[in-house]
Image (cartoon, coloured by chain):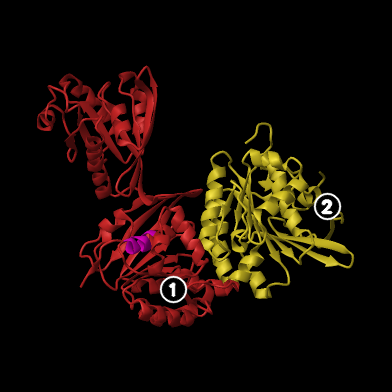
Amino acid sequence: MSQVEAVGVPQLERLICPMPEHTSLLFVNDPGVEAEAFLYQGAHAHLAAGGRVVYAVTNRAPEAVLHAMAALGLDADGHKERLAFLDAFSAHMAQPSNAKHVVQNPSNPLDFARVLEAAAREAPDAMLVVDALSTLVDQAGAERFEAAWPRLQSAMAKFRWSESLFTRWPYPSSVERMLEDFDGVVQLKGVEDRITISQYFRVERARWRVEVDTKPRLYRSLKPGGVHVFIPKIVVTGPYNAGKSSFVHAISDTAVSVDQLGTTVALDHGRVTLDGLTADVFGTPGQARFDPILRIVAGQALGVIVVIDSTKPDSFARAAEMMNLTWRQGLPGVIAANKQDLPGALPPEEIARMIPVPRGVRIVPCSGQDRESGRRVLKELVDLILAAGVSA
Amino acid sequence: MSGGRAGDRPTATATGGAPPPRVEIGVRRLDDLLEGGLPAASVTLVYGPPFLGKELLTRLFLLHGLRQGVPGILVLTSTATSDARQQLAQLDPAYPEYEREGLIQFVDTYSKSIGAEDDFAQAEYVDGPVNLNAVSLAVNNAQRRLIGDHPTHRMVYDSVSTTITYTNAQTTFRFLQVLVGKAKRAGATTMMLLDQGMHSDPEVQTIKHLSDGVIEVRPDGPANFLQVTGIGVTENRGWVEYRFGERSFDVVGSFSAGRIR
């Protein structure tokens, strides 16, 4: 039996794919948290792989879905012949619909199920998207929806697999219990400080996997770009002239520095996009007179890269000192053994004997001006951060 | 916040003690009736039949805040942003300046639903009144632009009636329960509009239950009357006559304020 290999969000795929066929995956979002992009990317990934998609939309016109996908940079137009909309919105607004499947009475979940069954008969190999299941509860009322749920669930199971969205308004507990019927659940939640300031996803359940990584991942929905796991602060520190600014600029897509005659006197800032992940990188000055601000810059960092000049062992003591200023117990960290391309550069094993390296911290060789080697250092750190769980 | 403006600070009363945290509406005698204004971070339902100046009252509330440098969010479910901007500019010639200062934000669930080509940088356009998560997200985005520089803001939801019409009272209640809770945490003082005659009594009671109080309006012959319940006003002052025109809303009836201003 073939499996589902892609859900369109690389950092989520790592956690839940492959999925067996006929899996029902549910995204449950807090109100006010960006959620639809997960569905758009899932649908687009399947279309791009040559598959068919039935996209059921309940709270806006199908054209709005196409526009939103385009805003994320997802070209659905090129796959139109394999993308069929199931429109459970237009009739509610007394508007005409050009969709292939139309629900004439969207407030009746049995009518929705009937149209869904017909769509499944036509395209049983298609992926089904239900955007959003909670609107069906809203339109029908909790009791009618609960009564229709077994048939709805059965209709959804006729597709190759399904992805649904459910906004968690304060529904009765009986509605919440129905969410137990899904094979997989991904929570999309907000972090609040007066308003929702950031959002994270967390795989709550994936019944097809023996072990599930349930750690939260902060994310942003970029237009264009779609869902990116977001690491808001990685600090790059190290002794004076170790190559920190060059490192930040080399690994970043965009970067700025506040410097004086080429020496960083405030901060370097870069934004990196890497494998469905976005990180903000902050480089510190290296001179001792700026040490008071190091702790401030390192505050709330999710990871630290200490850049050292592999050709200058006399600067390693200073590197260790800066490590102590920026590190705290359990914080993921990597030492970037920079300038490996220069004569006299010490190999990582030798550096490890000369610097007191905290447990779990790896020394990764690099040449800071070379983007690829710099990104290998970053990737090493990102893997450690994701393994630790992005703090939400 | 612009220098020299008072902001939504508590207004002092003559009763002594700590000043109650009140936010002036900007209609002087109505603020007197309210013992200084609406409680800060409260939710007030403005309820009554159409064409009695309810909408005007909410716009004056927003504009009074803008004049003091307090930003506002106008959530529109049955009016386009362009029309609302025009109306605000007619009410206050200085309104374009408030826009330039970035003090006003719109959440517009109407324009896209009618295919209008409305495009204003300080507006979040939602693709339909039923997409309630998108409305919630849009309000959050609007607040994100304001709260960094402003401890408080004002919000008007115009109107609850449209949301009920496109969904139902129960769904609207759930949605507003979340929205109102978030608005309070964000420091918003909110007015919500509800039209009388469009909804059953239980529906109206359901929505009233979400509010801290109600300003209710009704016609009586050639005159119009309003009554305040809740919103921290402890004394029932009955129905008080008011008049409104294109740009003005005045309480003209007498009432005992129990204090001298």
Magenta-drawn stretch, dominant element (helix, strand or loop): helix
Judged from the image, the secondary structure of the residue bearing numbered disc 2 is strand
Q: Nearer the viewer, residue B195 or B256?
A: B195
Contact, mark 1 vs mark 2 (Cβ under 8 Å) = no
Q: x, y percentage for residue B40?
A: 64, 49
Q: How crowded is mark 1: few (under 14 residues within 10 Å), some or many (20 or more)?
A: some
Q: How crowded is mark 2: few (under 14 residues within 10 Å), some or many (20 or more)?
A: some
Judged from the image, the secondary structure of the residue bearing numbered disc 1 is helix
Whether residue A217 sits left or right of residue B110 in the image: it is: left
Q: Do labels 1 and 2 share a chain?
A: no
The answer to whether one can see residue B208 in this image is: no
Whether residue A278 sits left or right of residue B25 in the image: it is: left
The answer to whether one can see residue A214 in this image is: yes
Subunit that carries the residue with mark 1: A
Question: Which label number is shown at residue A37?
Answer: none
Residue in view at x 83 percent, y 52 percent: B250
Q: What colour do you see for chain B? A: yellow
Residue A210 located within the stretch drawn in magenta: no
Q: Marks 1 and 2, Cα distance to the nearest angstrom? A: 48 Å
Question: Which label number is shown at residue A175?
Answer: 1
Residue in view at x 24 percent, y 45 percent: A384
Residue in view at x 75 percent, y 45 percent: B15
Q: In which quarter of the image is the N terminus of chain B?
A: top right
Residue that numbered label 2 is attached to: B250
Q: Which amino acid does label 2 sit on?
A: Asp
Subunit that carries the residue with mark 2: B
